[in-house]
Amino acid sequence: MHVGISGIGFYVPQTTMSAADLSVATGVPEDVIARKFGVRSKPVAGPDDTTAVMGIKAARKAMAEAGIQGSDLDLVLWCG
C-alpha cells in the first residue's frame, strides 16, 4: 500500500474587502489595518461559497493536478 500527496488544490473567493471596508466594519482605523496588520484586502466568501463548496472546488483542483478522478480515491480526509 502506498500513501502520499499527489496534488494540492486551493480555492480563494473572488470577492474582497479592502482595508477601508474593514475599517468601516470594525471601527479600526484604516492605516492600522493596512500598516500594522499588513492587510490591504482580504477575500470574502459569497453567499454560495459555503465551506463544503469551497472545499469541493479546491479538491477538484488537487485531483486535476494529480491527474486522477474521484473514483481513484480510497480515502478523503476533511478538516474544516
Image (cartoon, grey):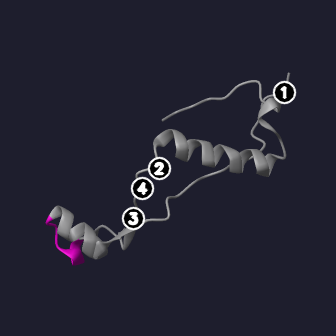
Numbered label attached to residue 49: 2
Comparing labels 1 and 4, the label whose residue is closer to the camera: 4
Q: Quick one: SS at disc 1?
A: loop
Say which residue label 1 marks: 2
Disc 3 marks which residue?
42
Residue at 60% x, 52% y is 10
Residue nearest the viewer, comparing 40 with 24:
24
Mark toward the start of the polypeptide (3 vs 1): 1
Q: CA distance from mark 2 to mark 3?
A: 15 Å
Using the image, tell me which numbered label, if any, was put on residue 64: none
Q: Which residues are magenta?
A: 27-32
Q: Is residue 8 left or right of residue 34?
A: right
Measured Cα–Cα span from mark 2 to mark 4? 5 Å
Q: Please provide percent x and percent y for residue 75.
A: 71, 25
Where is residue 15? Give x, y as percent: 44, 65
In this view, the residue in front, 57 or 10, is 57
Q: Amino acid at mark 2?
A: Asp
Q: Is there a contact, CB below 8 Å, between mark 1 and mark 4?
A: no
Q: Is residue 18 above or below residue 61?
A: below
Q: Earlier in the sequence, mark 1 or mark 4?
A: 1
* In-image side of 15 versus 39 (left or right): right
Residue drawn at x 26%, y 67% is: 22
**CB under 8 Å between callouts 2 and 4?**
yes
**Sequence order check, earlier mark of 2 and 1:** 1
